[in-house]
Image (cartoon, coloured by chain):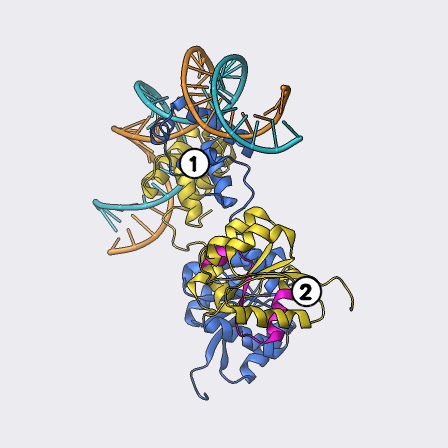
Chain colours: A yellow, B blue, C cyan, D orange
Amino acid sequence: MKNIAPIKICIVEDDALILKSLQQVLNNAEGFQVTGTFFSAEAALEILKDHCPDVLLLDIDLPGISGIEAISKLKHLQPELNIVMLTVHEESELVFSALRNGAVGYLVKGSSSKFLLQGIQDVYEGGAPMSPSIARQVIASFTPQTEHVLSDRELEVLEKLSSGTNNRQIAEDLFVSTNTVKAHIKNIYKKLHVNSRAEAVSKAIKKGWI
Amino acid sequence: MKNIAPIKICIVEDDALILKSLQQVLNNAEGFQVTGTFFSAEAALEILKDHCPDVLLLDIDLPGISGIEAISKLKHLQPELNIVMLTVHEESELVFSALRNGAVGYLVKGSSSKFLLQGIQDVYEGGAPMSPSIARQVIASFTPQTEHVLSDRELEVLEKLSSGTNNRQIAEDLFVSTNTVKAHIKNIYKKLHVNSRAEAVSKAIKKGWI
DNA sequence: GGTGCCATTACCCGTTTGGGTGATATTCAA
DNA sequence: TTGAATATCACCCAAACGGGTAATGGCACC
């Protein structure tokens, strides 16, 4: 497993000591290579394209453009870039925001070298290093609601609405008349306090019902 | 740390051997107690309320009602129940579906006792045991797309559509004519391959654009 | 035994939408 | 400089939608 092309890593970190330390750990390890370092998101945005890393380590708390903001800008330049956040406090709301914005994981500053290298390796292989606690926050954010204001039938109709089906077709699919379908839709509107298919669908999806 | 109330666990697993093995591992461990076992989701649904576990281990591949389907039904009965899937193939699409449906994590059948106990402990403490690979799928599912097929203006119109705004109102909001709004909507339809507001909204939300 | 929720069907009517076709001006990259 | 994409506007027409009102039977809960 030696002499394989190493994983190319860029680091954005404003603390020179931490940057130095990360760089040493990575460059001394087999299979890892730091190809660029930056002290700010702005600097990274300007010349990142010349370094083309496999993984970008991005400090979450940067002066100027924050790490969180930088994510979308960087992804805009290189959509396939794997961004891993560097954070001090693992349980921060910021970490969660970062994941929401397109980061694939995070590493805690001050972790053991072994842990850092493993995390980067994970990302390189398509994984996402994170603690069980953060992972749970992430899945909770898209978990469907269990309480149902709508009846089963209404939910069924709502599904059809979301796929753009018109009343006549829904009626055929459910083996009822179009009048019935209209009645269901009217009830859905009442319950969700909306007055169009689009809004009903939007609300239902955001609530995780469909 | 001894003699604290143990974590109460119920298991739903149709394979008697696996069930027996799990039960032994858990009951022999300090701090864990199996308070009920079931061979099917149906059985669990009927009498689970009498057992009231902290964590429910649920086989993903059950006869009759599948594990995936069972999740929502169980959550309906006990919304706060922590459900952990039992799976043979960790990288299955099924695992991903389970998390989407409200499971908080999964355990791989045949893992070491240490790993099983740790996973359950994680869940009990508010975590979510999963591999980096699955975690990445999960976050990918709600990460906004960076590549934009739609123009900024079209995206703006799409937002309005999702809130149920009609053409006349959108026109007013954007200070253009209704004809222009119609033109934008037609272009959105072409690009997304849809032909109704509801479907456009549905697609856009699921892609994370709005 | 009423009261409420659900599923079903019916009718009317005005408004909105979706689809077709076509035009003009700007911008930006090939 | 010549397309391609974008943003803007116009007109027409058939189909679909949203809202109002009303009725029936089933089922469950109190």
User: What residue does disc 2 label?
Assistant: A33
Give the letter of the chain under mark 2. A
Magenta region includes residue A114: yes
Closer to the camera in the image, B66 or B57: B57
Q: Position of residue B18 (x, y in %)?
A: 63, 72
Q: Name, please, the residue furthest toward the bottom.
A: B2
Q: Residues within 10 Å of mark 1 (few under 14, many from 20)?
A: some
Give the residue drawn at x 61%, y 78%.
B113
Is B72 drawn above or below residue B18 in the view shown? Answer: above
**Which residue carries the number 1 mark?**
B156
- SS of the residue under disc 1: helix
Q: Give the range drawn in magenta.
A: A97-121
Residue appearing at x 55%, y 37% in the figure: B149
- Tag 1 subunit: B
Is residue B77 in view from this perspective? Answer: yes
Q: Is residue A68 above or below residue D24?
A: below
Callouts 2 and 1 on one subunit: no
